[in-house]
Amino acid sequence: MKYSMNVKNEGIAKAQSKDVNASYKDLGAVCDAIRYTRADMALALLDRVIAMEMPVPYKRHNKHMGSRHELGGAKGGYPKKAAAEVKHTLVNAIANASNSGMDAESVFVIHAVANKTRIERRYPSKGSLAWGRGMYGRSSLNHSDIEYAKIEIGLSEPDAQFLTSNMRYFIRKNSRTLKTQEASKPQKKKEDKRGEAKVDVQKAGAQKDEAKMIAGKTAPLAITANKEERKEDRK
């Protein structure tokens, strides 16, 4: 299989998908979002995009596209279909990396592109005669074609020798952000403990309410029993 990246096969794990029936513009935006990130973080990002929890920034082909506050006001969208196709290719690349002896948890996405491969004409279905077009079927005035794309993903370890200075710079930049995210995880745990404490307080309050309800139900029974005992003593 031919790749657009001219790098030796040593120290890199590749994967590609051909004839993908998806927009190459959306695929290119998704590939730009996961490039130079760690493989597990890229998978997490794609899962969030598929679940429509995190948008993808569109640097190009963003005319009439709304801005997203999650991206700091930049234009973006939620390409679910493109993210699912890129995720499928990324999973294959991670499997190839583990089979070649790399650590699948520490590899980075150093190559991620999507290109248009071929275009097929979509013909009208057979049925009635076309209106003077020389073919069968009611042909519409506007024909929509099918565009197929190709996805390429390459994974490598961050200390590989063939990496360029540009690749090393972006990998270091993204690894710093990962360190800051990992350092902020204990704060989330404290917040979770506070939430658990709130839940415990709520459970205690519910138990007290149940005890009051039970006490309210049993109190009338005790009063009636005392009245009956008094009547028997008088007799």
Image (tube, grey):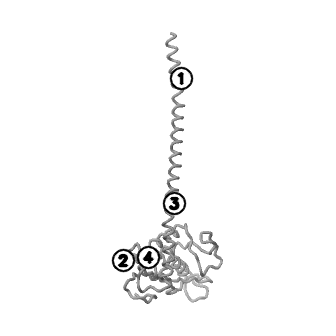
Helix, strand or loop at label 3? It is helix
Residue placed under numbered mark 2 in the picture = 102
Residue type, mark 1 in image: Ile
Q: x, y (%) of residue 64?
A: 65, 77
Specify which label sits upstream in the sequence, 2 or 3: 2
Specify which label sits upstream in the sequence, 3 or 4: 4
Residue placed under numbered mark 4 in the picture = 90
Residue placed under numbered mark 3 in the picture = 187
| 130 or 85: nearer the viewer | 85
Which circle marks residue 223 in the picture?
1
**Separation of marks 1 and 3 at Cα, in angstroms:** 54 Å
Of circles 1 and 3, which is in front? 3
Specify which label sits upstream in the sequence, 1 or 3: 3
Specify which label sits upstream in the sequence, 2 or 4: 4
Which image quadrant: the N terminus? Answer: bottom left
| 164 or 31: nearer the viewer | 164
